[in-house]
């Protein structure tokens, strides 16, 4: 038996004893070493997010571990190897998959939503995920808490790919939570020379630590004036909305330069709408995109960046809890304690 954080019903996440999965043909059993928690987990627990979520699922979609056992027919995956996994299991035959958007698969299944996730001592990678190449085996080991960040980093890479920051460009990141901080780090890696972050007062130091050239707690017209001043009146080449605040939907367009690119990366409240001025898009020829989930290629790229040290974001994890204290870990995320919270079964 093993311990696992099971979503019994809306509002009820319970640490339970469940059977350890046994890998069948083509399957791999992973011993979890770290699972970081994100805001989406909170939304699943509260019932704010239900699409694709199976009652009774083991939560956790940002995980890292080691191969504990392999099923018959699995080659090239040594026991003991450090691994993570693309959480997107796609059908590979629908229109979205065939157009290169497997992360938007019409038959999408996700670890930590439908498939059991990483808030447990062990996780089973089913045959379909193995056949599709979802498992990523590291060549150079890194701290488990850093590897667990491959999932959010991969999602940010997908969003960043929509706006393609070029060297010398200016970037505004709206939101300084963990996702905003990762977008700041990626903009710096891409060569942006001006990176303005706007968010809560308590996260501004972290924003500059991750690469922002300026971090402010401004909103509304004051923020617009600040961006104009720091871009010589042009506006930003790229604006990334990394927090689901409806008021930012139109302001992001106001902050963009002529020919600028805006990415609505954050999810907004379900069923809510925002008013925008379409002439901002029309007369400035602004390109507007979204960003949801990540491809397997994004996950592999994330692992490469993390393991090489090119993307140095391991310090994003500021709090660690043993699995026995998963409730306390979830509470810490809800209270916005620190930056990123990790649950580590082996810490007990």
Image: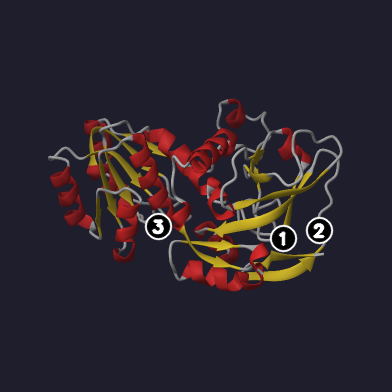
Q: Is residue 308 left or right of residue 219?
A: right
Residue 219 or 87: which is nearer the viewer?
Answer: 87
**Real-space CA distance between mark 2 and mark 1, rounded to the nearest whole angstrom:** 8 Å
Above or below, comparing residue 288 to residue 247 in the picture: above
Work out whether residue 275 can be spotted: no
Residue under pointer 1: 121
Which element carries disc 3, helix, strand or loop? loop
Residue 47 or 33: which is nearer the viewer?
Answer: 33
The mark lying in front, picked from 3 and 1, is 1
Check if mark 2's residue and mark 1's residue have beta carbons within 8 Å. yes
Residue 209 or 273: which is nearer the viewer?
Answer: 209
**Quadrant of res 235:** top left
The N terminus, quarter of image: bottom right
**Quadrant of res 316:** bottom left
Decide: few, some or many residues near mark 2? Use Cα within 10 Å; few <14, some 14-19, many ≥20: some
Q: Is residue 179 left or right of residue 331?
A: left
Which element carries disc 2, helix, strand or loop? loop
Q: Tell me which residue sits at (80%, 36%) in the image.
A: 74
**Quadrant of res 73:** top right
Query: Residue 20, labelled with which disc?
Result: 2
Above or below, comparing residue 52 to residue 204 in the picture: above
Which element carries disc 1, helix, strand or loop? loop
Q: Tell me which residue sits at (44%, 39%) in the image.
A: 310
**Residue 71 picture location, percent across and down:** 84, 42
Query: Residue 93, labelled with which disc?
Result: none
Q: Is residue 279 left or right of residue 229?
A: right
**Residue 195 picture location, percent across and down:** 27, 45
Residue under pointer 3: 177
């Amino acid at each position: 038996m093993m311990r696992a954080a099971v979503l019994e019903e809306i509002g009820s996440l319970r640490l339970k004893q469940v059977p350890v999965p046994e890998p069948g043909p083509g399957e791999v059993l992973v011993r979890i070493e770290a699972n970081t928690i994100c805001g989406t987990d909170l939304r699943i627990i509260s019932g704010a997010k239900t699409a694709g979520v199976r009652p009774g699922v083991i939560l956790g979609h940002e995980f890292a571990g080691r191969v504990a056992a392999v099923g018959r027919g699995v080659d090239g995956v040594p026991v003991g190897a450090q691994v993570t996994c693309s959480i997107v299991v796609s059908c590979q035959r629908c229109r979205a998959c065939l157009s290169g958007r497997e992360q938007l698969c019409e038959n999408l299944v996700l670890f930590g939503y439908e498939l059991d996730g990483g808030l447990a001592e062990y996780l089973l990678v089913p045959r379909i995920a193995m056949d599709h190449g979802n498992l990523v085996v590291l060549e150079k080991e890194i701290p488990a808490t850093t590897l667990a960040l491959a999932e959010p980093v991969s999602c940010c890479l997908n969003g960043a790919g929509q706006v393609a920051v070029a060297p010398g460009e200016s970037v505004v990141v709206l939101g300084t939570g963990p996702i905003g901080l990762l977008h700041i780090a990626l903009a710096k890696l891409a060569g942006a020379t001006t990176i303005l972050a706007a968010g809560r007062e308590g996260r501004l130091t972290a924003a500059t630590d991750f690469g922002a050239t300026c971090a402010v707690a401004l909103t509304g017209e004051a923020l617009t004036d600040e961006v104009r001043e720091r871009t010589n009146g042009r506006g930003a080449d790229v604006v990334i909305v990394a927090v689901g605040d409806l008021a930012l939907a139109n302001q992001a367009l106001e902050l963009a330069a002529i020919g600028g690119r805006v990415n609505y990366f954050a999810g907004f409240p379900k069923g809510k709408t925002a008013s925008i001025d379409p002439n901002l898009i029309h007369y400035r020829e602004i390109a507007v995109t979204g960003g949801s989930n990540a491809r397997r290629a994004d996950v592999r790229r994330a692992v490469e960046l993390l393991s090489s040290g090119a993307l140095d974001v391991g310090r994003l994890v500021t709090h660690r809890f043993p699995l026995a204290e998963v409730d306390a870990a979830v509470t810490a995320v809800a209270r916005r304690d620190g930056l990123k919270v990790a649950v580590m079964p082996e810490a007990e």
